[in-house]
Image (spheres, rainbow, N blue to C red):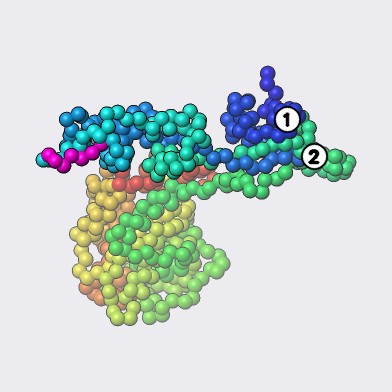
Amino acid sequence: MHPDLTERILQHLETADQVDTLDLAAKFAVDHQKIVGALKSIQAHGELVNAEVATHKSLGLTDEGRSVVEHGSHEALVYAAVPEEGIAQAALMTAGGPNAKVGFSKAMSQGWILVDKTVTPPLVRRKVEKITDSVKEQLKQVAAGKGDALPSKDVTDFKKRKLLQETTTKSFVLSRGPEFATTLTKLETDLTVEMLSSGLWEQLKFKSYNFDALGAPPSRGHLHPLLKVRTEFRQIFLEMGFSEMPTNNYVESSFWNFDALFQPQQHPARDAHDTFFVNHPAKSHKFPQEYLERVKKVHSVGGYGSKGYGYDWKVEEAQKNLLRTHTTAVSARMLYKLANQEGGFKPAKYFSIDKVFRNETLDATHLAEFHQVEGVIADVGLTLGDLIGTLYEFFRKLGITQLEFKPAYNPYTEPSMEIFCYHPGLGKWIEVGNSGVFRPEMLLPMGLPENVNVIAWGLSLERPTMIKYGINNIRDLVGPKVDLKMVEEGPICRLDHV
């Protein structure tokens, strides 16, 4: 069995004053790069060898040059294509091969052929009976490794004709160094406490650090499926001309979350069994006072054509802080701002996608927090037909074309509709959202004109994500049980491909 390549190099240097790594590669019948790699290992052990860089230039054939060696030079091919009776130059260009133009020029300069203009049309005729293809013979010498014997003038000409190319090879000339030995000692890679305490480190040799090494690449982050689906929803809203609402307030007052939406203070949703109330700070105190009085009136005694709820509305109940139960609280703020902006009302389209919180019993399809996707359009004379048409377009962009609507009840929309779609993958109709036209009792106290209607719809982000990624339990999508491998390997979300 042959000794290690590094030891073979050292053993060779023991009997030779110096040697080139290219010669070693030929002697050992191994690739030159392996010799260079072994040299680097030797150098890591200290000054066992001296290595000086050597540059070697050599001539090699190009693809075109190899074709000349096999078939003949361009000028020889053109000469061979000229018959004794002569040939028209145009026909010669076809018969002389792809490089006939160059071959014709070279054959003319060599005096091998001539153009006879005494006939019409002029003919190309042979000027000599036979030729010697010196270009082919010289390139054969290069192929045989004897390119150094070529005259420099011919080498220059062949380079211009792209028949030859010069390659530069770097090697190392090795000689014995001051610490020369024929075997390598093992280098230590770690400095331990025992080495330091015993003083052994002074007798050992350590492997040098390679500060130019790239190191292990850090593991990269991966987008959660919810974020991928959220990006798709957001892009659809932006394509439809919607503006994104600010949803950075997780804590809302009951006023904006319930009262501004014409939801009565005795509604079951305002109970602690359904809503997370905040203890500190427990109450909010800054409200638009005139707007608050109008909301109080429409709840208590009615107005704007409504009888109201007929109860004693209390500001203390409206002041209670809570974790918002829907992003419609944000919509209420935006609509109030829209109604009271300078320059009067202007049509607007808003959307939001963010977290909401409800005191739900946890199961396979419910969590205490989830994401709500909401779209709102405010304009003059909007009808239920506008809402249905917008929903068809919105869901078409999601890849859903089969929709059905079911009448429903919401405190702040009338009429209201639940949205169902047929999912081919599941083979059944599923509920995907809720929608409706905001009530006048909600809009008119804000200051919006009477002829302005607002249509809106909302759906969860988790449900379409679970359907898209084939997840049956919401706790496998959100929370401590999430499989990080699923997050890493999850495909790109394309909602238009169900």
**Residue at point 30% right, 65% down?**
349
View extreme (right): residue: 198
Spot occupied by residue 145 in the image (x, y as percentages of width and height): 50, 30
**Disc 1 designates what residue?**
16
| Left or right placement of residue 474 versus residue 331 in this view | right
Spot occupied by residue 147 in the image (x, y as percentages of width and height): 49, 34
Question: Residue 364's quadrant in the figure?
Answer: top left
**Residue at point 27% right, 29% down?**
129
Q: Nearer the viewer, residue 353 or 175?
A: 175
Of circles 1 and 2, which is in front? 1
Residue 487 visible in the displayed image: yes
User: Per the image, is 174 magenta?
Assistant: no
Residue 366 vertical placement versus 317 (above, below): above
Mark 2 element type? loop
Q: Quadrant of the C terminus?
A: top left
Residue 263 vertical placement versus 22 (above, below): below
Disc 2: CA contacts within 10 A as few (<14), some (14-19) or many (>=20)? few
Spot occupied by residue 114 in the image (x, y as percentages of width and height): 23, 38
The magenta-colored residue range is 113-119
**Disc 2 designates what residue?**
178
Q: Which mark is residue 426?
A: none
